[in-house]
Image (tube, helix red, strand yellow):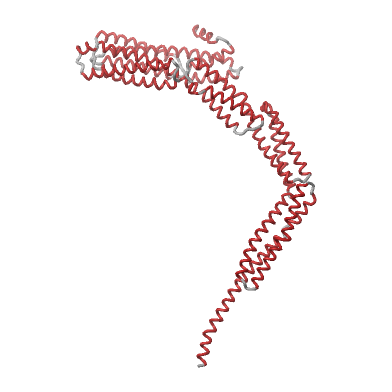
Amino acid sequence: MDGILFFGTLFFVVPSILIIVTLNIIQNIKKKKIKKLIDKLEYEKNVIDSTPIVPELAKIETFLKNEKLETLYNDWKEKLNDLKTKQIPKLTDMLLEAEYSLSQRDYKNANYKVVKIEMEIYYVKANSEFLLCEIKKVTDSEEKNRSIITNLKSKYRTLYEKFTSKSIDFGEIETSVSMQFESIGTHFEEFEKAMENNDYAEVTQIIKAIDDLLKHMELVIEEMPSIILMTSKVLPKKLEDINSEYKYLVRLGYQLDYLNVEYNVEEANKKIEDIITRSRVLNLEDSTFELKILNDYLDSLFSDFEKERRSRSTYEETNRFLEQRITKTNMLVNDIFLQLNELKRVYNLSEQDIGLLEEIKKQLSILNNDYKTLNIHTSNNAFAYSKLISEIENLSNRLNIIDAKLDESLQSIGNMKEDEARAREQLEEIKEIFKEAKKRINEYKFPTIPKLYYVELNEGASAIKEVISELDKKPITINILNTRVDTARDLVLKLHSHVKDIINQAKLAEMALVYANRYRSTYEEMDRNLTNSENFFYNGDYQKSLDLTVSYLNRLEPNILDKLMLLMRSE
């Protein structure tokens, strides 16, 4: 019984002892962990307490010379006193309370107090560091401010030297810029006074003001001369040229309302005046950007004027050619319908052929009415030439379709031998004129033969081929043949006349260049313009080369063109 009792007692006692030992170990671990945290917080509190605020604050006592700094000093002193007498002692009390809870094995409450201490230390530490930083801004500011102001003075001198070296480029703004430099110089004097009075808060503001002013002056020195040049010379000259060109073109019958030139020029002048007004007070905000937009717009107006000139030239040339074609097509269709009864009797025309001729006549009548309307709009200056080109091109394309249908219809109409013989005789004459034109163009040594010659050469050759082709047809359609002969003759005569013009232009242009070379070494502008004239000459644009050379020679020798033409005739 005793053995059973012993083992029973042992069975209950040993586990209990093990549990107690384990719990004690766990409690000791908790205690050590909390104690370690408390020690760490104690160290951090001591670090805060040893922050060198007092010696830094003592430095300020040596240069208390103004009311503002004295106010800051007293405020910092109060904050330091609050830190030393309230915030740090409070931390000490909280640490003692945490240690007491730990000694009482109240681990839960000890942990809670440790967390509160950590938060309070963070708050006190932030206050301490901020206070030290504020004080050091003053105690360390003199050396730092002297270094900054030295750099700013160097920048000031550099900018002032740049300004004085090109002060003439600033025009009426020169006085404003000089006064601004004087204002910056006054700020440097204010800096010295503030440093002497240890007014470091004011010093910081002065340094910032000087830095901002110098950055602005850097932009003024860099951008103002170009702004003055653009607003006083470049843009006013362009606006004057645009007004003159616009009025001239309107007098010549150009329709330019769609460009709104007068309104836009007025707005451009307002914008230029606004930029000038702002420049007088050195306000450059967006000025360079706005001037670039204005300059680009004015350049685009010149391009639009040139476009209208080219469009008019193209339109008038196309219109002359279209009028000739319409006239010839009308005559041809009228002749066909005058002979239609005879053709029906002599030739076995199908209903399809006759229907096609009726459709051609109807389409041609509509085209004639549309062409008449277009000419009315042209004479009334109702539309810009750049808009009219598309209309006349549409009419030309419609006439092409009519001519194509007419050609198709006339393929089945015969011809007469007498007209055929006459056509062959005229063809030989046309060929001789064509050969003479090619011979003359080959005899003169051109640097470049204009592309228009090859276009007209191909047109003439094609027209001759069309005449030959028409003569080879059986049966021959006499009206078409006559049209082809007329077209070939017109085109070949046009080619022959153009060849003569090209040769005369080239000779005159070359003679003018050679004659103008005598002034080349004397006049720099003449040298530049002769280079442009030579480029036109070697590119085959002899008329432009001649016009450009003569325009500058006329300044030295009026009526030089008459003299050159006389020299050319005498050769």
Residue at (68% x, 64% y) in the render: 43
Report the front residue among 348 and 55: 55
**Vertical placement of residue 5 versus 187, above or below:** below
Q: Is residue 407 left or right of residue 116?
A: left
Residue 517, by quadrant, is: top right
Note whether residue 465 is visible: no
Image x and y of residue 543, in percent:
48, 15
Image x and y of residue 535, in percent:
51, 21
Residue 91, by quadrant, is: bottom right
Note whether residue 19 is visible: yes
Report the front residue among 7 and 96: 96
Q: Is residue 155 left or right of residue 442?
A: right
Image x and y of residue 227, in percent:
62, 29
**Vertical placement of residue 203 versus 565, above or below:** below
Residue 32, by quadrant, is: bottom right
Q: Is residue 521 left or right of residue 62?
A: left
Image x and y of residue 362, in percent:
29, 17
Q: Residue furthest bottom?
A: 1
